[in-house]
Amino acid sequence: MSTEPYLPLRPAQCHQLRLRGIDTQLWRWGRPDGRLLVLLHGWMDCAATFQFLIDAAPAALLDYQLVALDWRGFGQSGWAAESYYFPDYLADLDALLGQLAPGGEPVALLGHSMGGMVASLYAGIRPERVSQLISLEGFGLPATRPELAPGRYRRWLDELQTEPELKPLADFAALAARLGKHNPRLAADRALWLAEQLGRQADGQIVYRADPRHKWVNPVLYRLEEAQACWRQITAATLWLAGNEAKLLSWLGEDAAQFAARKACITGLQYEVLDDCGHNLHHDAPARVAERLMRFLAQS
């Protein structure tokens, strides 16, 4: 018996917005006149990733104006003309807020993984624009050393001479199976629905909507000290949520004291670890994440 895809309980209203020369897909839920909460997805993901969180949330969350975007080169947004650079995500977010909140009023940001990293940097770069900040497993990348730069630039130059490819799959079920392999708590119907958002049919196969050039290495090393300098400028109430099964310290290559130094950069940071959750905690425990989100929004 084949699995039918998940049917959203609170379907999004989707439309395109022109941001910095790129047609950008927006997903909207809630009240158009409500307080603005912008949702930022992670690398190789798309705005649809938040659907399960929206569906599991208390009804009060729908009093907010909830807006998620497909970052450039992901989901149904347009692709960049050449390559992708991390600062462009900051500029795209800045442009988005300029259209959603043109009066400059502060808004709430929630980001997962890469989206959390973008949100956290932005909250320190333009602290007057962010009232509340929630990061789901988006606490920065492993620290790097300057002596790695020559090899990184060389690898980037080599990759520019190749044709990037994300291998196609036979059908959406195959893509759903791949998603489930990396996220075993993701129910089969949800994996299939998410696969239909992440992929599209082409020549009898399923190809990723994401631009394969996202697989090219970033030529610029991640500089933890720069990220920390931005975090120290954050004035928004901030909540970091982690999954206990994500093996965060191992991935970062840090011990508890080093990770504590990251957390110490943000004044008044609330940090919590959710049990029975991996990196995609908004999939593993959407109701618990939504409940904690609502408590945080109500108190801050």
Image (tube, helix red, strand yellow):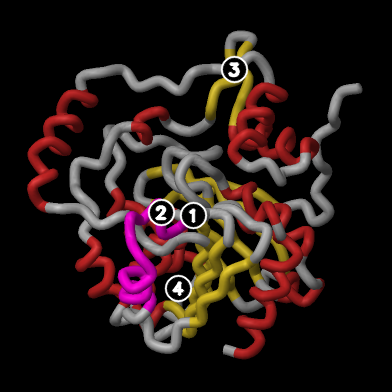
Is 261 covered by the magenta stretch? yes
**Amino acid bearing label 1:** Lys
Residue carrying label 3: 169
Q: Nearer the viewer, residue 136 or 147?
A: 147
Estimate the spatial distance between the alpha carbons at disc 4 and disc 2, rounded to whole Å: 41 Å
Residue 292: percent from left, percent from top: 67, 75
Residue carrying label 1: 247
**Amino acid bearing label 4:** Pro
Specify the quadrant that holds the C terminus: bottom right
Q: Nearer the viewer, mark 4 or mark 1?
A: 1
Choose the circle earlier in sequence order: 4 or 2: 4
Q: Quadrant of residue 58?
A: bottom right
- What secondary structure is marked by label 3? loop
Q: Nearer the viewer, residue 165 or 224?
A: 224
- What secondary structure is marked by label 1? loop
Estimate the spatial distance between the alpha carbons at disc 1 and disc 2, rounded to whole Å: 5 Å
Residue 249: percent from left, percent from top: 41, 59
Specify the quadrant that holds the N terminus: top right
Label 1–label 2 contact, CB within 8 A? yes
Give the number of marks. 4
Using the image, determine if residue 204 lies above or below residue 128.
Answer: above
Magenta segment boundaries in residue numbering? 248-263
Is 43 covered by the magenta stretch? no
Query: In the current view of this chain or complex, which residue is farthest to the top?
Result: 203
- Specify few, some or many for label 2: CA neighbours under 10 Å numbering under 14, 14-19, or 20 or more: few
Label 4–label 3 contact, CB within 8 A? no
Q: For this view, does 272 lie left or right of residue 115?
A: right
Residue at x 64% of width, y 57% of height = 277
Choose the circle earlier in sequence order: 4 or 1: 4
Estimate the spatial distance between the alpha carbons at disc 3 and disc 2, rounded to whole Å: 31 Å
**Amino acid bearing label 3:** Leu
- What secondary structure is marked by label 2? helix
